[in-house]
């Protein structure tokens, strides 16, 4: 293993500014991940030619694949900087520099930081919450059968990293597809005994333009998801529920 | 209160990038579902019928002519043809092209099985579309009209496939179309929530593969049968059946002349 690692990073100073690629050479340490690699650059922000530059901006928080902040394109694929191990990345493309770039389908804020508010907007559109806001204590919620809990738990692991949306061929500015994560969250809250009160509204929302029908079932989402959510299963289940709701509405509303 | 200016929506994406879901608005759900359904019924059902009917070529020009005559003897056959074949097919094809061009394939970055299938479904769909345009034009609306002359079906196809380029087009289109249909059934089951589980999708995948392969082999066998058969008579219909069309024919003499051929051959 060489004593240093080369990294090519796509950089952009302002949201609408020009982008450039800077190459860095970072001392190698065993067990490094992209977070620690970016930390090394921040310690000594000098590119491979010795030219001083600024530390690379990127979103991060927990550094342990639980907050979903640090998703970026690493060697061209959407994944989390914290759980992307340098040894594995170098084995992917031996002898070549590691490349880092911002997620391609979200507006760049700066460098590797992107604006992922479309996910937040979509979660709001599908009402991905349990409506228990009130002025008094509602007491204990309804009991949840363990069988339901077991189905819900994997869906509750979503970290809103947007990898499923980035890798989806249907998620683009023509279809404005809602993406796998909001569909999975709609299922999560539809299965919640308290959240189910908004079930019909969630299903109607998902039948709008850019809704569940735009899914092309390329199944990239489930491959890319760092938390291994059963996304295709959620889309399939919700596809049926949305259709049934549309039929019901057609005959009853 | 009226003077209070509403702050700009905090979507902050400022018009760039993918826009949020238009919850509950628009009709694209209906059109997508119609597109998906039309691929199974009536178009998929018609494809199965078409390949089964064409398989009669294996039994020779007379058997094939009888099948063509039978189909053209169905009640309201022109209504069936337009209502269950041409119009749904045109919709499925045009809306399918619309869907295909709205996708942004990324199979280079993510060369995964499902992603390859996603691209193949679009490629085979467009191959099938281009093929079907020329196929319908040349076999249904050009040359001898088969609804009026079912006996000429085998010879018409045989003349078409005598051109090696056309033969290659037919073989490619047969593979592409049956592939598109087989994966289309699988996609239908997955998207409509019939096979939500991973195991169910995998098992159903084998079913679709067997169906697709069977249709493809039958289709290719029909092509082989037509190409390798001895030159077919211009009218292969037996006299008994031809008599039915004879009554309708304004020029009876010509039909009688054409009838002579099969009796000589058989």
Image (spheres, rainbow, N blue to C red):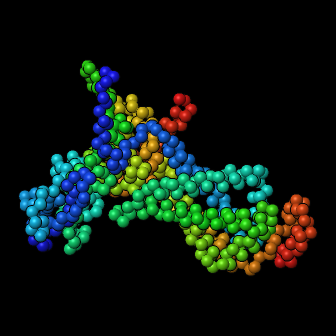
Q: How many marks?
A: 0
Question: Which sits in the foreground, A151 or B87?
Answer: B87
As drawn, which residue projects farthest toward the top? Answer: A136
Query: Does residue A211 sit above or below B53 in this rendering?
Result: above
**Residue at (9% x, 63% y) in the render:** A52
**Residue A150 as seen in the image, left or right of residue B22:** left
Q: Position of residue B29 (x, y in %)?
A: 50, 44
Q: Position of residue B155 (x, y in %)?
A: 75, 73
**Residue B74 appears in the figure:** yes
Question: Which sits in the foreground, A217 or A157?
Answer: A217
Quadrant of res B164 = bottom right
**Residue B109 as seen in the image, left or right of residue A59:** right
**Residue at (80% x, 65% y) in the render:** B149
As drawn, which residue projects farthest toward the front? Answer: B3
Q: Position of residue B25 (x, y in %)?
A: 46, 38
Quadrant of res A148 = top left
**Residue B196 appears in the figure:** no
As drawn, which residue projects farthest toward the left? Answer: A43
**Residue at (20% x, 55% y) in the render:** A13
Question: Which sits in the foreground, A233 or A6?
Answer: A6
**Residue A251 as seen in the image, left or right of residue A71:** right
**Residue B84 as seen in the image, left or right of residue B188:** right
Quadrant of res B110 = bottom left
Q: Position of residue B98 (x, y in %)?
A: 51, 54
**Residue at (62% x, 52% y) in the render:** B88
Query: From the image, which quarter does the N terminus of chain A lie in?
Result: bottom left
Query: Does residue A169 sit above or below A250 in this rendering?
Result: below
Query: Does residue A173 sit above or below A46 in this rendering?
Result: above
């Amino acid at each position: 293993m060489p004593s240093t690692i080369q990294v090519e990073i796509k950089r952009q100073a302002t949201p609408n500014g020009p982008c450039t690629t800077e190459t860095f050479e970072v001392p190698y340490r065993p067990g490094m991940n992209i977070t620690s690699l970016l930390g090394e650059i921040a310690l000594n922000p000098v590119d491979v030619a010795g030219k001083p530059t600024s530390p690379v901006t990127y979103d991060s928080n927990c550094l342990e694949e639980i907050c979903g902040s640090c998703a970026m394109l690493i060697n061209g694929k959407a994944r989390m900087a914290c759980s992307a191990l340098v040894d594995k990345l170098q084995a992917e493309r031996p002898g070549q520099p590691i490349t880092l770039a911002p997620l391609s389908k979200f507006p760049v804020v700066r460098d590797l930081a992107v604006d992922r508010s479309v996910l937040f907007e979509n979660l709001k559109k599908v009402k991905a919450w349990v409506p228990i806001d009130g002025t008094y204590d509602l007491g204990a919620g309804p009991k949840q059968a363990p069988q339901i809990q077991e189905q819900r738990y994997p869906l509750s692991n979503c970290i809103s990293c947007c990898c499923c949306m980035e890798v989806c061929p249907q998620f683009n500015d023509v279809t404005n597809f809602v993406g796998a994560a909001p569909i999975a969250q709609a299922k999560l809250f539809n299965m919640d005994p308290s959240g189910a009160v908004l079930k019909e509204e969630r299903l109607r929302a998902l039948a709008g333009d850019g809704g569940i029908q735009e899914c092309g079932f390329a199944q990239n989402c489930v491959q890319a998801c760092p938390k291994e959510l059963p996304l295709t299963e959620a889309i399939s289940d919700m596809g049926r529920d949305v259709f049934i709701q549309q039929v019901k509405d057609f005959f009853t509303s | 209160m009226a003077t209070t200016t509403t702050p700009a929506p905090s979507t902050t994406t400022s018009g760039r990038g993918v826009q949020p879901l238009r919850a509950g608005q628009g009709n694209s759900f209906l059109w997508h579902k119609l597109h998906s359904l039309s691929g199974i019924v009536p178009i998929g059902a018609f494809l199965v019928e078409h390949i089964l009917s064409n398989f009669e070529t294996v039994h020779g020009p007379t058997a094939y002519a009888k099948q063509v005559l039978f189909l053209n003897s169905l009640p309201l056959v022109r209504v069936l043809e337009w209502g269950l074949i041409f119009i749904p097919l045109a919709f499925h094809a045009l809306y399918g092209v619309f869907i295909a061009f709205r996708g942004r394939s990324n199979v280079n970055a993510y060369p995964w099985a499902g992603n390859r299938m996603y691209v193949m479904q679009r490629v085979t769909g467009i191959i099938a579309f281009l093929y079907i345009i020329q196929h319908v034009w040349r076999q249904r609306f050009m040359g001898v009209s088969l609804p009026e002359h079912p006996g000429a079906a085998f010879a018409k196809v045989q003349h078409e496939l005598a051109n090696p380029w056309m033969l290659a087009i037919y073989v490619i289109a047969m593979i592409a179309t049956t592939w598109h249909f087989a994966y289309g059934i699988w996609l239908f089951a997955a998207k409509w929530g019939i096979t939500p589980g991973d195991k169910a999708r995998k098992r159903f995948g084998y079913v679709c593969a067997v169906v697709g392969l069977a249709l493809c082999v039958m289709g290719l066998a029909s092509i082989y049968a037509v190409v390798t058969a001895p030159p077919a008579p211009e009218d292969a219909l037996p006299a008994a059946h031809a008599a039915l069309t004879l009554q309708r024919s304004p020029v009876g003499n010509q039909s009688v002349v054409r009838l002579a051929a099969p009796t000589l051959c058989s």
